[in-house]
Image (cartoon, rainbow, N blue to C red):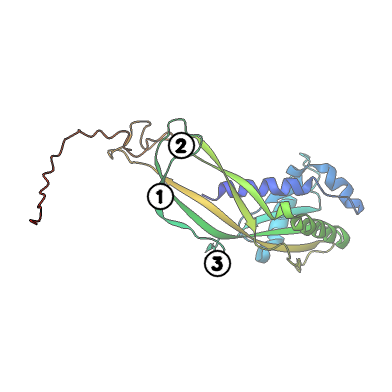
Amino acid sequence: MFEPLKVGVGEYLTGFYGTLVATTHPMQEYVQRGVAKSIAWAPSRMVDAAEDMLAAWQRNDTDSATTRPAKLPVILVAMDQSYTPTGREFARQIADSVKVIMPGDAKQRLFGLRTVFGDIRTQLVFAAADEPTARSLVAQFLNFMDAVPNRRFGYSTVFAGISEDWVATIESPDIPAIAIRTGQKNVVMLAVDITLKAQIPLYNAPKAGEPNDGKGVPGTADPAGYPVVIEVDFDDKALDIQQSVTADSP
């Protein structure tokens, strides 16, 4: 359900990675390494397990060489397991299903639509072998996020073979980076928590055995839509109306 949002986050961070300026010697290698070997997803939130997440990263073979450990710096990203509906002062969910025809649907099928609008807490941990590198990565990320176009990002969902674009908004770009104290020497870890306000569509279509428009197969990736009224015929009927006119006598 939230996988499209994670894809959008990945694309957002890829855009950030492309803007990095190497301000320290370790960053010179980092900006040349490639995003696939520089930013990684981790399960759930990492504040309480940051060292474990970093250890898992360091067990990876960044350069496909069994004798070389994974490099620092690295950015680890995770989404919190919890879920909070977005406040009504910001947006409203569509809780009651409404009937819609998706733009781009050549079959013009009628589907039901509800939307989930939630606050998705996401954490980024910036890990480096030295403080200047870790702080530079964080500072550049917060600067990137502060740019007006970067306060939101898009992601795509697919239903009935049709892709739709949605937008997630970053609640606030003014976020502190908190140092994570670890028992590891020569490792600096800074955590940034952001809240994404994201709308996720929930489409529904007739199930097998329910009335449908016959334009697809219920229960498949190409479902049928709900029946619609195409044409209404009226029979013309003449209605005689008798009118009584009463004339007042002079």
Based on the displayed image, in which of its 4 quarters is residue 79 positioned?
bottom right
Q: Residue furthest left?
A: 249
Q: Please provide percent x and percent y for residue 178.
A: 75, 68
Identity, as a three-letter code, of the amino acid under mark 3 = Glu
Identity, as a three-letter code, of the amino acid under mark 1 = Val
Report crowding for label 2: few under 14, some 14 to 19, many 20 or more residues within 10 A (C-alpha).
some
Alpha-carbon span between mark 2 and mark 3: 32 Å
Q: Residue furthest front?
A: 250
Residue 60 at least partly seen: no
Q: Please provide percent x and percent y for residue 235.
A: 20, 33
Horizontal side of 18 relative to 248 (left or right) equals right
The residue labelled by disc 1 is 98
Alpha-carbon span between mark 1 and mark 2: 17 Å
Which residue is pictured at 61% across the width and 53% down the height?
168
At numbered mark 1, what does the secondary structure look like: helix, strand or loop? strand
Q: Please provide percent x and percent y for residue 215.
A: 37, 30
Disc nearest the viewer among 2 and 3: 3
Alpha-carbon span between mark 3 and mark 1: 22 Å
The residue labelled by disc 2 is 160
Identity, as a three-letter code, of the amino acid under mark 2 = Ala
Report crowding for label 1: few under 14, some 14 to 19, many 20 or more residues within 10 A (C-alpha).
some
Report crowding for label 3: few under 14, some 14 to 19, many 20 or more residues within 10 A (C-alpha).
few
The residue labelled by disc 3 is 89
Disc nearest the viewer among 1 and 2: 1
